[in-house]
Every structure is written in C-alpha cells, then in structure tokens.
Amino acid sequence: MRYLVCIKQTPDTAELPKVKPEEAASGELSIQQVVNPWDEHAIEAALQMAENFGGLASVISVGGEKAIEALRSALAMGCKDATLVENADADAWGVAALLAGAVNHMGDVNVVVTGQMTVDGNSGMVPVAVARKLDWPVLTGVAKVLNVSEDAVEVERVVGQARHTVKVKPPVVLSVIKEIGEPRYPTFINIRKAARVKIPVLSADDLGVTVPPPVVHLSNFRKPPARDAHVQLFDGPADEAAGALIDALLAEKVL
Amino acid sequence: MKFLVFIETDSGAVVPSSWEALGKALSLSDDVEAVVIGENVGAVAEEAGSRGAKTVYLVEDASRSLFDLDLYVADVKAALETSAADAFLASHTGNGRDLAAAIGVDLGAGVIADALELWVDGDRLAGTRPVYSGNILVDVTVDGSPQIATLRPRAASPAEATGANANVVTLSPAAAESRVVVEKVERAETGEVSLTDASIIVSGGRGVAKDPELGFKLIRELADVLGAAVGASRAAVDAGFIEYKHQVGQTGKVVRPDLYIACGISGAVQHLAGMGSSKVIVAINKDPEAPIFSVANYGIVGDLFEIVPALKKAAEAKLSK
Ligand SMILES: Cc1cc2nc3c(=O)[nH]c(=O)nc-3n(C[C@H](O)[C@H](O)[C@H](O)COP(=O)(O)OP(=O)(O)OC[C@H]3O[C@@H](n4cnc5c(N)ncnc54)[C@H](O)[C@@H]3O)c2cc1C
Ligand SMILES: Nc1ncnc2c1ncn2[C@@H]1O[C@H](COP(=O)(O)O)[C@@H](O)[C@H]1O
C-alpha cells in the first residue's frame, strides 16, 4: 500500500492575527510558515496506517520553493519520500488538478490522505476536488482508521452529530480530523536524514496537467471590524455578580 | 437570479441551518426553488414549500436515507437541470461543503465557500468570506454555471413559514452507484445541541483542572438551564476532560453564537479563531489579566467553581419569570 499525504505550508497559527490585508492579497507573507496543523494529523494518520497495515507514506505539497521546509518536517516525522509541485497560480480546483495529476504520475498510490482544511484558505474543498478529479470515492471527517487492505478501507467518520462506520474499496481519498491522533515528534535521526534528502520539484508540464484557469476571484481584502474592546466587569459576592450579569444578558436579549 | 437551495436531511430530519440558506436565497430573489433528498422526507419538502420555496424537487429512496456523495451529486445535478437555476446554495455543513465542492469541480464552476454574506450583482453572485481563520475578510465572485455558494451556519436568518402550499415535484433517483457501505451509525444523545447551530454556548477550559469532572458538570448544568451547547478549549480536550467533538477553535469547530460564556479559558488566538465572531462574549476567569477579557463584553473575575453555579441559580430564578 502506498499512502500519499497532501500538505500545505501555512502561517503559524499564533501569528495569523498579524497577517495584513495586502499580504493576504499578494500571498507574500512576512510571518513564520509551518505545516498546516490539520495536515500534521494527516501525516500522523498515514504513518499509522503504514505501520498498522503495511506500506509506506509519501508526502506532497503544491506551493512555492519555501514549502520544501514543510515537506522536510513531514520526512522528519517519518514519511519516506517527498515531492513539491510548483504552484502555477492555481485556485482550489487547480491545486486539486495538480495533486490528482501527481497521483496519476506516481501510479501506485492507494490512499490519498488530507487534512480537514487549511488555516489560510479555510475552504475544506480540496480533498473532495482531488477525489472527483481522480474519480475516486472520498471520506471526509475521518476520526479513526479501523482497517486497510487491498479490498477495503474501513473507517469511522464524523458526519454532523453522528458517527458512521463505513467501508470503501480503495483507491480512496481520506480527509482526517484531529481525533485520528496527535502528530508525533520527529526523531533526531529523521531530522538529520530529512535535511539531506533531495526533494524533486515537478511542474504542471512534468505531470502532464493543464491547470484550469481560476474560477474564484478574490478582492477587497480587509481586517474584520474590531470587537468593542470594552469589558464590563461585575464584582462583589458570587451571587450578586452572577445576578447582575444575568440581568445584563437579558437586557442584551441574548438569553 | 433563480436559486436552487439544498435542504439537507439526516435520516428524515432536516438539518436546521438549511433553512438559513433558504432564507438567504429568499432575501436575494423571488425565484427560489429547493431540493430535498432522503428517505421519508416528504414532510421536509412540504415545509420547504411553506417556508417560501416555489418548487421543491424531491428525491426519495431508501438508498438516500444517509448522505452519500456520489448519489446526492447525481440527484442535485438532475434537479439543477430540471430547474435551470442560475445559482446553487447550501449550508456550509460537512455534507453541504462536500456536495458543493463536488458539483463545482465537476462542472468547472467556482464556489463561494463558507460565506458570511451574499449578494447579487447583475447576473453574478458575490459574497464575503473569512480567510486566515477569521483574521481577514475577502469579497469573492466565481465563474461558471451555476453560481455556487455555501453559507456559514448562523450567518443568516432562517426562512419563516408563510403557510404557502408547496409545489412538490418528485424526481426519480438519478442513476448512480454508491461506493461507500455504511456499516454502523451512532447518533449523539437526543436533545444535544450542536455547537455550530447553537445560539448559546457555555465553554470550559483548563481552569476546571482542580476537579475537571465537577467543573464540566457545573458547566453542563448551566448550559442545560440556558438551552446552550457545551464547548471546550483544546487544553481541556487534550487533558481528557471532555471529548474532542466539543473543541472550539483553530483545530476544532468554528462557532458564532449570540452568547459565548468562556469559563476558565485564557483566550489564546487559536481559541479566538473559533469563537471570536460570537455576538456577546462573557469571560469567567480568576486572572484579571487573562487575554479573554480584552475580547469579552462582560466578565466576572473569580473562581468558576463558585461563579458558574451562581450563574445557574440566577438564570433559573430570572428566566422562569
Ligand atoms: C496549531 C494549534 C492549534 C490550536 N487549536 C486550538 C483550538 O482549536 N482550540 C483551543 O482552544 N486552543 C487551540 N490551541 C491551543 C491554544 O494555543 C491554547 O493553548 C489553549 O486554547 C489554552 O486553553 P485554556 O485557555 O483552556 O488553557 P490556559 O491557557 O491554561 O488557560 C486557563 C485559564 O483558566 C483560568 N483559571 C484557572 N483556574 C481557574 C478557576 N478556578 N476559575 C476561573 N478561572 C480559572 C486561568 O487564569 C487561565 O486564564 C491550538 C494551538 C496550536 C499551536
Ligand atoms: N497547496 C496544497 N498542497 C497540498 N495539499 C493541499 C494544498 N492545499 C490544500 N491541500 C490539502 O487539502 C486539505 C484541505 O485544504 P483546503 O480545501 O484548502 O481548506 C488540506 O488540509 C491539505 O491536506
């Protein structure tokens, strides 16, 4: 079995509030970028599947030259090989076309593993788009992998308020959530090995993919209106403070 | 602009945020239709009509009892063809997101995903959505037909019942093969309020640590009195105080209730990424310097083990009046 994890390099979540509208518009950020946190869980999921059911985990990212750092983090966690695909001004469907193209190019991938969403783009639509481009089934909200074999992939997934146990025949795209497991720390040996790996950089042409022209157009990047920062505190004995707070909430008509 | 709105059902019951998508479409157009797919969902189709959808396309089949992407995509495409709608709208639930993504990518049409606001500009749909986890807003237009958008839950008022009679058009299930076998379904306890649909949320954080069981018991009791859902910080989830499905924030759920009561939560940016757009925020924290107070509208500095039960008592007394 070969698992291919799709990861994106995204801003460190602690620094997200510092992103300026101009930077969001140009995509050129001055802040620290790391592996998208949801994708760390995807890496963990692929490594667990490889350990528990056999096979190996590879990692791929569509992005700029700097995304190599994110790929090295994935190698340090235990992925066996990494590929960077140059981002050719692709929107979500374009990224999906490139990822699907890479899967076809590799030829032996059984399970594509993704995160639930990116902390910058936030759409959560890439996993389904990759699956549709490949004409593979897709399972989102995957919380637990029960079994993987040539014939069947069996998982538990969260669907709205319910939890479903489902089975599909691979190849399949799985989009995982945090419950799948805490991302492991890289080992010292793997960090050193990862630093030396030469990571191939492929273009759309190399993959034989024609990137569809963008169909989503963004404009007027701005900060959301600031919250009214003034906090009204209630003090005194607990009963009094609580009573005054409930009165204030009733007056606000939120109770 | 003619709209087709996806009314999501789950084992026969409507997913409430669907009515918000319908309400939003009705605020933009007087030509709004709906599509209802499921098993035993005739009543939901009737209700969609009575809430203002002119025509409701109904696909009923045992194979549709649970959402199945391959089958639902085929059914919605058939409904889109019959309706000749210019725009397709769904609530940005997990299933709504997957459905819109599949239809969009199949037809080469863009999606205005997770929109907070939508409007019509000539023959184009436009919207505003958050990116960078709510730290940036951006306006979005899309190419392609239909124009597709998903609306964030609680971003619009639900369509109200008008008493109109539904014009229900039954469509036969589209010819498509399911690729997923559902072996087991476990439901949440009945009566449990979903975080993303909740108008009030009471959340607990690491501040419950000295007695986590009691802390979340007190939080649940307050939530019950207020008809609220229970949320949590990641620290509380990671410490095993409460299940992951309650986590609010960057790697949990994004919520926007009218009222968010944070108990023993410091207010880290990753927590704010999930609840920062709540209408009114209340902080209960023993540390007056906690960052949560700089986004809160109201607060009490004190021990949550005293304050939360006092709030419950006060709410019981005042809400019964
Ligand atoms: C990639 C990434 C993703 C993350 N995703 C999320 C996420 O989705 N959701 C999330 O919440 N966090 C997330 N975090 C973690 C976040 O950075 C914080 O660590 C977390 O929110 C802290 O939780 P807390 O406020 O409960 O705990 P703390 O920061 O430890 O705060 C506890 C608070 O309780 C108060 N307190 C203590 N005892 C009492 C008492 N008896 N009565 C009243 N108050 C008391 C303290 O004064 C303190 O302010 C993420 C972090 C990273 C790096
Ligand atoms: N540029 C990219 N390169 C590789 N994987 C990506 C990229 N963008 C998104 N993904 C994957 O798709 C998931 C959902 O992202 P999104 O739909 O952009 O919110 C992420 O968690 C990744 O696993």
Image (spheres, coloured by chain):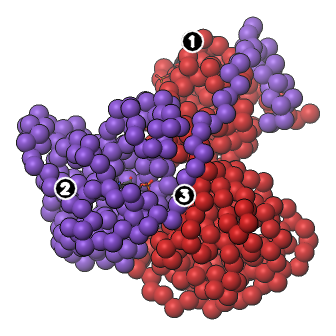
Instruction: Give the image location of residue B300, x and y in percent.
Output: 68, 16
Q: Is mark 3 within 8 Å of ligand 2?
A: no
Shown in red, the chain is B
Question: From mark 1 to mark 3, how far is it between C-alphas?
Answer: 42 Å
Assess disc 2: are there few (<14), some (14-19) or many (≥20) residues with their C-alpha within 10 Å of its C-alpha: some
Give me the residue at 54% from left, 57% from top.
A217
- Front residue of this view, candidates B56 and A196: A196
Q: Is residue A61 visible?
A: yes
**Which of the labelled discs sits on residue A201, or is there none?**
2
Q: Where B318 falls versus B25 (above or below)?
A: above
The quarter in which the N terminus of chain A is drawn is bottom left
Q: Amino acid at mark 1?
A: Glu
Q: Where B118 falls versus B68 (above or below)?
A: above
Q: Colour of chain A?
A: purple
Q: Which residue is mark 1?
A: B289
Give me the residue at 44% from left, 59% from top.
A91
**Which of the labelled discs sits on residue A217, or is there none?**
3
Q: Do discs 1 and 3 share a chain? A: no
Question: From mark 1 to mark 2, how far is it between C-alphas?
Answer: 48 Å
Q: For this view, does B219 lie left or right of residue A137?
A: right
